[in-house]
Image: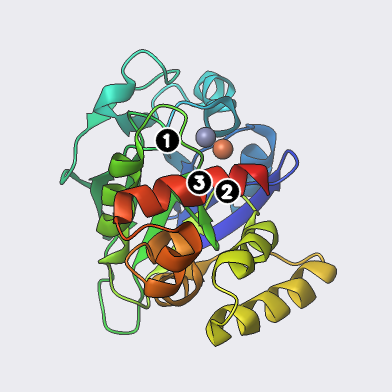
């Protein structure tokens, strides 16, 4: 399965999944239809599914137009998003499995950013492959999504689910927020050498206007403060030893940053 990263709007990524052997495509969070239509045309592939992570417009804005072209495609989303995702036909719960080509994905219910947010984890099928995580606006490079509908406790539980995946898992998040997130991270975790190193690297990558996505679970565990709510340095910076409160305060500090 090949993943194509399509930049849209100011800082969103749409991901097009391509199964070369069967020439099938699926799209994750099509905020716009036109870049998706262009890419599937270039590949000569058949679009079979839309995988939505949550109902925000920058993630579903292209659903309706894609359905005009391809009325038969399956539209997946979270069961709690019923009525909020255009064309949704399949309502997914935590632990559900879906298939695309020869790959299968497990659904994680990850409320926090919204009350209905889900993530798609495509399992590797052989040792040479990595798992692929599509986590929308839950986990970002160096950060996490804002809490629009969920609580800090929900977001912490959601992030804990995701960070239990293998370190080599590639993370395809929906926004290019990494540099700003890491600059904030340095204010609460300044002695973290991995973080310092990553920040330097990401600055160079962004100065060349290149993407920082995909990231990996291993990299996020060592540098993302929102995955380090039990770490003594982060707890010192947030002045609490309670992990939920640590996350809540980090989120508040990030909003002011
Ligand atoms: Zn969102
Ligand atoms: Fe978004």
In this rendered view, identify the residue nearer to me: 212 or 45: 212
- Which residue is at the far front? 239
Q: Which residue is mark 1?
A: 52
Secondary structure of residue under mark 1? loop
What residue is drawn where x is 33% and y is 22%?
81
In this rendered view, identify the residue nearer to me: 73 or 59: 59
What residue is drawn where x is 42% and y is 21%?
85
What residue is drawn where x is 65% and y is 50%?
6
Q: Which residue is mark 3?
A: 251
Residue 169 occupies quadrant: bottom left
Mark closest to the chain's N terminus, 2 or 1: 1
Q: Does residue 50 appear left or right of residue 157 in this picture?
A: right
Q: Quadrant of the N terminus?
A: bottom left
Residue 90 position (above or below residue 256) = above
Mark 2–mark 1 distance (CA, rounded to whole Å): 29 Å
Indicate the position of residue 55 as horizontal and vertical percent values.
Answer: 45, 26
- Which residue is at the far right? 207
Q: Which residue is mark 2?
A: 253
Q: Which mark is residue 110?
A: none
Nearest to viewer (mark 2 / mark 1): 2
Nearest to viewer (mark 3 / mark 1): 3
Q: Does residue 145 appear left or right of residue 14 in this picture?
A: left
Secondary structure of residue under mark 3? helix
Mark 3–mark 1 distance (CA, rounded to whole Å): 25 Å
Residue 101 shows in this picture: no
Indicate the position of residue 125 as horizontal and vertical percent values.
Answer: 25, 72
Residue 189 position (above or below residue 110) = below
Establish whether ligand 1 lies closer than 8 Å to the Cβ of label 2.
Answer: no
Mark closest to the chain's N terminus, 3 or 1: 1
Secondary structure of residue under mark 2? helix
Do the residues bearing badges 3 and 2 touch, measured as CB atoms within 8 Å?
yes
Indicate the position of residue 78 as horizontal and vertical percent values.
Answer: 30, 31
């Amino acid at each position: 399965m090949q993943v194509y990263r399509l930049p849209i709007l100011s800082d969103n990524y749409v991901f097009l999944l391509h199964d070369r052997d069967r020439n099938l495509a699926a799209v994750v969070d099509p905020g716009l239809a036109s870049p998706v239509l262009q890419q599937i045309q270039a590949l000569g592939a058949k679009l079979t599914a839309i995988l939505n992570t949550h109902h925000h417009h920058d993630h579903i804005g292209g659903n309706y137009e894609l359905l005009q072209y391809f009325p038969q495609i399956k539209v997946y989303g979270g069961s709690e998003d019923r009525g909020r995702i255009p064309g949704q036909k399949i309502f997914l719960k935590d632990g559900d499995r879906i298939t695309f080509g020869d790959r299968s994905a497990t659904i994680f219910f990850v409320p926090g950013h919204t009350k209905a947010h889900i993530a798609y984890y495509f399992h590797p099928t052989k040792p040479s492959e990595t798992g692929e995580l599509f986590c929308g606006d839950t986990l970002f490079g160096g950060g996490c999504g804002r809490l629009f509908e969920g609580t800090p406790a929900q977001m912490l539980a959601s992030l804990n689910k995701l960070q239990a995946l293998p370190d080599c898992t590639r993370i395809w998040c929906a926004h290019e927020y990494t540099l700003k997130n890491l600059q904030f991270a340095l204010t609460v975790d300044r002695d973290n050498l991995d973080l310092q190193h990553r920040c330097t690297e990401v600055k160079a990558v962004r100065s060349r206007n290149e993407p920082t996505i995909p990231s990996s679970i291993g990299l996020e565990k060592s540098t993302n403060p929102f995955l380090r709510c039990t770490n003594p340095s982060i707890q010192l910076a947030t002045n609490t030893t309670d992990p939920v409160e640590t996350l809540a305060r980090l989120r508040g500090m990030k909003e002011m940053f």
